[in-house]
Image (cartoon, rainbow, N blue to C red):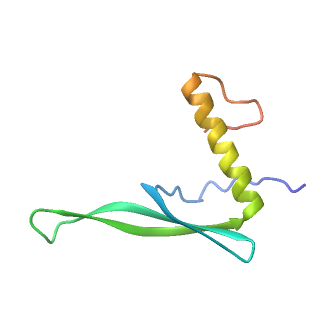
Amino acid sequence: MTNLINNSHAPDIFADDAVGFFTYAGNMRITCVSDRSDYSTSPIAVNRVVIGRLVMPVAAAEAMAKAILDQVGRMRAGGETPPNVTVQ
């Protein structure tokens, strides 16, 4: 197992939605979008803009999906986070 090194300069990325999932060569590719305002039009238009793609091995994507669902379940139940999870 490798060590986890925290990079305090790593960017936070906010996405309004994940709009596409594509599996190729053993990797899951997830396309993320953010809603952005276009002030050059009247009335203002809101566009869904691709902000990035997360690519990870399918096994890692499956583990992440399970971890996210576990966290949502704890949030809905009002429970605590498990001791091996760091919340910052």
**Residue at coordinates 77% horizontally, 59% vertically from top-left?**
59
In the rendered image, which quarter contains the N terminus? bottom right
Q: Nearer the viewer, residue 9 or 32?
A: 32
Looking at the rendered structure, the number of numbered marks drawn on it comes to 0
Most extreme residue toward the top is 78
In the picture, measured across the screen, residue 19 lies left or right of residue 77, that is left
In the picture, measured across the screen, residue 40 lies left or right of residue 73, that is left
70 in relation to 55, above or below: above
**Residue at coordinates 39% horizontally, 61% vertically from top-left?**
34
42 in relation to 73, above or below: below
Image quarter for residue 74?
top right
5 in relation to 70, above or below: below
87 in relation to 34, above or below: above
In the picture, measured across the screen, residue 39 lies left or right of residue 24, that is left
The x and y percentages for residue 60 are 74, 58
Most extreme residue toward the left is 42
The x and y percentages for residue 22 are 60, 70
Most extreme residue toward the right is 1
Image quarter for residue 72?
top right
**Residue at coordinates 60% horizontally, 39% vertically from top-left?**
88
The x and y percentages for residue 46 are 25, 62
The x and y percentages for residue 84 are 77, 35
